[in-house]
Amino acid sequence: MSEAVLDPAAFAHLLEITGDDLEFVDELVDTYFDDAVVQLEAMRQAAEKDDAEALVRPAHSLKSSSANVGASTLSEACRSLEADGRTGVVPDVAVRVADCERMFAEVRAALLLERASR
Amino acid sequence: MIGGRVLVVDDTAFNRRLLVRLLTSIELETLEAENGREALALLRDPAVAPVDVILLDIVMPVMDGYETLEALKTDPQLLDLPVIVITGVDELASVVRCIQMGAADYLPKTVDPEILRARIGASMSAKRLHDLERETLEQQRRLLATIDRQRSELARFLSPQVAALVSSDDGEAMLAGHRREITAMFCDLRNFTSFSEAAEPEEVLGFLRAYHGVMGPLIVEHEGTLEHFAGDGFMTFFNDPVLQPDHAARAVGLAVAMREHFRELSAEWRKRGHVLEIGVGIATGYATLGRIGFEGRYDYGAVGHAIILAARLSGEAAAGEILIAPRTYAAAEETIEVQPAGDRQLKGFSRPIPVYAVTAIRTKELAE
């Protein structure tokens, strides 16, 4: 991995605004996991059908929630997919969605590791 | 603490949970909707307590933020509800569009609770100010309706002209007193005293009611300013407060119409043995007009030579006679038929005055 999977500053911000309520942040992160699975599935289906328009919303959603938990790289990949989706043409869509799925797996692992290391 | 209810509209559970948590931490109540359609259903549900602010996501399935804003801003019940758009970092263009569509403000998705508190507080005060403004407008509308009602109520006690004058901008100056040429008309009944002695009181009142019922509408129709009704007599004048260049002719026209209408009325009473007739006096001249009376009871009245002369002529008039002063005759000459009724020596006037008795209105068109 050339870039960090998690941006510690973003995660710290999340902790800060919730008043350092780790329990709540954990719940929130679990919500993020559940949601990400749903959005990635929708993105994969859109990629299979090569439906650029159908890619926009799930990519948008995963972009913002990933940014919130500090998954900056995944968020950026989703942003790029969303932007291309809006133009109607998404080059290498299958590869890029697969990349997102891989990145999410790494983010998930990193977040769970962070939780386990407390 | 600001207090209030906030509706969070976002399709991702993550965002809703985070926002609800932040809002709860600043002691705001929350409601959640997954998209615009759900939000509108909640807002329109009478069983759901009203909300103070909406936090609205833009990209959502079913009904997105733009469509939701559109629906909110075209609903008279909801258009004043402040909407704060919640956005990601790269959505500034969307924010601009939302604000153009009527959104009050925008917030990033991960927001510091202090900023959230400040922005929601500001939106709610703006709404309260707006509500207050609307309430004030409503009060003003009610006040105006009351004034309108009072004015129409007033018109039942005053001449319509005087009622209008009281409510007009120059009303105060006019009421304070002014000089103007007017034509005054006095009318009372011949034989009324003997009638009221002979008849039962109920009969007298019944007659007066019928008499006023006939004369009143005629005065209104000819646009005379009724100064007072007193038993069998009344005084009305023309050319004030509303200017009437043909005031002399109008007064004579009213007198002739009254004489005609009174004949129908008196025919009924003649059958019962009471012979009643009107006697009318009309004079033209300068008078002082305005508020006359005392605190607690004022009339809009006229004082002057012409009024006294009209009263004297009314006293001089025989049954069914309309006596007019020379100035009235001169002013209305072209429209009326008269017979000279001699030079009369009247109480309070040093010299005899030539008097004319009106026989008819000359032309039908002018009598219209």
Image (cartoon, coloured by chain):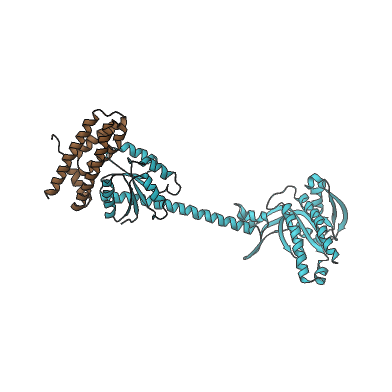
Judged left or right of residue B283, residue B153 is left
In the image, is residue B106 above or below residue B324? above
Judged left or right of residue B51, residue B19 is left
Taking depth in this image into account, of A10 and B30 the one nearest to the observer is B30
Task: Answer whether residue A63 is visible to the viewer in this image.
Answer: no
Chain displayed in brown: A
Q: Position of residue A12 (x, y in %)?
A: 18, 46
Q: Residue furthest left?
A: A117
Counting labels gives 0
Judged left or right of residue A58, residue B143 is right
Give the quarter of the figure containing the N terminus of chain B: bottom left
Q: Position of residue B301 (x, y in %)?
A: 69, 59
Judged left or right of residue B34, residue B257 is right
Q: In which quarter of the view is residue B48 placed?
A: bottom left
Task: Answer whether residue B205 is visible to the viewer in this image.
Answer: yes
Q: In which quarter of the view is residue B293 placed?
A: bottom right
Taking depth in this image into account, of A101 and B223 the one nearest to the observer is A101
Q: Position of residue B94 (x, y in %)?
A: 33, 38
Taking depth in this image into account, of A16 and A6 the one nearest to the observer is A6
In the image, is residue B296 above or below residue B343? below
Q: Position of residue B134 (x, y in %)?
A: 46, 52
Chain B is which colour? cyan
